[in-house]
Amino acid sequence: MRTITIALAGNANVGKSSIFNRLTGLSQHVGNWPGKTVEKAEGTLYFRGHKIKVIDLPGAYSLSPYSVEEVIVRDYLLSREADVVVDVVDASALERNLYLTLQLVELRAPLVIALNQVDVAEKRGIAIDHEKLSEILGVKVVPTVAVTGEGLNELLRATVEALEKGEEMVARPLTYGKEVEERIKRLEVEVRRLGLSERYPPRWVSIKLLERDPLVAELISKCEGGSKVLELADELARELEEMHGEPSPIIIASERYSKISEIVSRVQRVVAPPRVRWERVLDYATTHPLLGYAILLSTIAGMLGLVFYTGSFLSELIESYVGDPLAEAARALLLSGLSAEAVEIVVDGLVAGFVAGLVVVLPYVVPFYAVLSILEDSGYLARVAYLTDNLMHRIGLHGKAVLPMLLGFGCNVPACVGCRILETHRERLLCGLAVVFVPCAARTIVILGAVGRYLGVLPALSIYLLVFLTMLLVVRLAYKVAPGEPMDLIMEMPAYRRPSLRVTALKTWSKTKSFIVVAFPIIIAASAALEVLNAMGLTELLVPAMAPLTIGLLGLPAETAIPLIFGFLRKELALVMLAEALGTWEFLQAMTPAQLYTFALVTSIYIPCVATLAALVREFGWKRAVLVAIATLAAAIVVGALAYALATALCL
Amino acid sequence: MGERGDELDCALEVIMTFERRGLRADDASIAEELRRPPAEVQKMMEEAIRRGLVVKRDGYYELTAEGLKRVLRHRELFIHDRFVHRESKWSPRVRDWGKHWRHRHGLTKGLLESFYKALTDLDGRVEELKPLSDMEPGERGVIVSIACGLGAARRLAEMGLTPGVQVAVVRKAPLRGPVEVEVRGTRVVLGYGLASKIAVKGLGGPA
């Protein structure tokens, strides 16, 4: 018995992940596509004596070569690893969804179509004749409701049966309009002569060449006689462009859509007017020019409040029930065999680092992931993007960046990963830069614990304001210098739907799991490394070394060098270290209010913590991560120096 | 251009529209379209003939090559001022329009050609076009041309926003926020800047 490989393909928001989760449950493994920062989810299941490997391909609207996700989907399909491609199609948005289907047909992928969310379509008064659709395309079409699992058994059965019987699963090619079709045919004849590998269907190659696809053009240019084919393709594409007055990729897209309209008119009927339901009311309220913003603000406030409340509660619980006993146990265990200094390194370094990870990750990030996953699944985040697009434009980003920014309030690490939802590399990088300025839970502790507690609420709020102003300036500046074309918001607005508990739980778990793998080892290692430095007395050497910065520019006491360095490890540690360095928790006895204010401000802005830096490296590579770190460090010094000068001039 | 340049452009637009629809325009029909007294129109057209923009045959007007060029320039300027450069009050004198489109607005050579082609093929007067961002919620229209960079144009096409498709504005966020449109049975949100570069011919309110 051989393992069957099924790949799930489909647009975003069609319930593809729900189907994947339903099929594979907890057996899934989430990693990255080789060399790419795009999530790859795999899982296995057993069905009628077959072992089936399921691969959840990234959501894609098209198979163009211009987005990382789409290239991954395309390369995977071209590798012909999958025995079957299950194309998940949203029945309530059939026309748009068939756009990808048509491209899968062009690619001659072995297809089974999961006509998903038929319940939603029904509620909107749309009836789809799936048998007719199957007849037109020449592939199996199975109606499903992923949220409840309805139809998934049939989907598997249809797939496995077709494989067992060795049925033809490749759809019959669709013909496009005369002008385009003629040119495809002409080009196809030439492409066939090139003797390409079986993996590249000549018709698909021809269409791609007419679309001026650079990746396929590169492939062809390497073949013998390829340059002639490219010349012909260029000539034919130009003919089309002259005829239609549109660039050829737009002409081909229009062509696909007109074919789709034809198909849809044959299989889809609007049987009843859509019912006015709660989702309509909710949609209206959450996008309303006044009410919408009120709901948005209370949602964010509520979410942050909830996460911080549960977070600090859980954090204390973990600290006292896990952290402290663990440290005690480790100390007792090690004291018997090791020297006192080594014990310090292990206990204050490794164990403290582990506990720190535990205390930061679990209590804050898990609830955050859960709440955000619910907001995302329900479709609310798209409304948030709609409402905040305008605001985001002020810093050169657009509405979709709001999710990573929100994530940043909890912890910057998932926020950096969250930047992946943006399309282009440029946008991701700009968003990553913006995100590291967002005061995370740890920085909030410093701001509230130092400034809020000793100087009052208004100065604390002014720090937030200054941090955001700095972010605005830095990102604006980066917006000007970053290479690439700025993109405007183009986003699908999904209908509201009830989020499923199962999906939320699985999503939260899989993200937490991959997060622990990245952040945990780094926090522990860095914690131990700093403890080693401490034991060797190197940190004390740094105090005079950093004096020009601390005393000279920022006007801080020289001892603050230590907490500032420790802040790199864990920002909230800066507060504890400050108390230790100054020898008192009554900061105002050792520092002027202006100094304390500057300290908190600088701590909030300078270099993201080590775990965030690691996330930046993973997402954007070394060079860019270092650039971001330098940018924040420079911003912190400038803003800190200015703030200190101003505060001194103003009041003290 | 003369002080009545705008009026004259509108008259030429009318003639062009009639021609595209296989009809012919005379003084009366132009007067009716422009809602002007026929005597005034007649005077204006005499000037147009003198300048070699139109010729009169059996009482009907026909555009000359010069006239056609002027209509296209008028359309280009109209689209530019209404759609693309609408935000800047400062308007520099543009000498080389092709260069201006390429450098300022990211239109590549191919896109520019298609843009001019769309201007030539336009069914109706250019004054009937408006940016998608100016449509009111509930209003419907047909996309005529998209004057943005190829990257965005391609993404729009993939989402189903191709020239010739019917769209309906669902809602607009306040203060030049994004526009939500319904197209091909799905809803798509477009940033204001992008929406203002999409030229739409209105079809009126919901049926």
Image: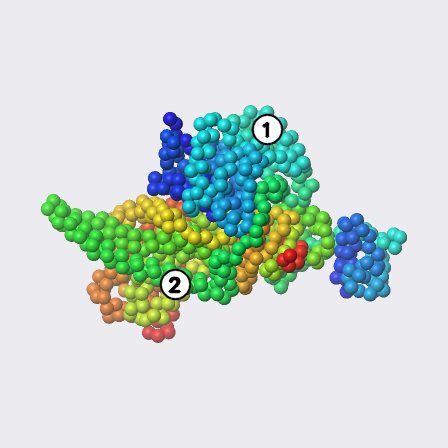
Q: Residue A446 carries which label?
A: none
| Mark sitting earlier along the chain (2/1) | 1
Q: Which residue is drawn at 61% across and 41% down?
A: A266
Q: Let me know if marks 2 and 1 both belong to one chain.
A: yes
Give the amino acid at mark 2.
Ala
Residue at 37% across / 48% down in the picture? A502
Whole-percent x, y for residue B58 in the image: 89, 52
Question: Which is closer to the viewer, label 2 or label 1?
Answer: 2
Q: Nearer the viewer, residue A152 or B64?
A: A152
Residue A499 on image: x %, y %: 41, 52
Where, quadrant-wise, is the C terminus of chain A in this rendering?
Answer: bottom left
| Residue A2 versus residue A384 in the image, above or below | above
Structure colour scheme: rainbow
Residue at x 79%, y 49% (from the top left corner): B22
Q: Which chain carries label 1?
A: A
Can I make out residue A549 in this image? no
Up/down of A268 relative to A555, above or below: above
Residue that numbered label 2 is attached to: A301
Host chain of mark 2: A
Query: What distance separates the C-alpha of mark 2 from that of mark 1?
Result: 59 Å
| Viewer-closest of A358 and A337 | A358
What residue is shown with label 1? A191
- Residue A561 left/right relative to B128: left
Q: Can residue A325 be seen in the rendering of this structure?
A: yes
Quarter-wise, where is residue B74 in the image? bottom right
Residue extending farthest to the front is A272
Amino acid at dot 1: Val
Instruction: Locate the N terminus of chain A and report the quarter of the image it occupies.
Output: top left
Residue B62, position as x, y percentages in the image: 82, 52
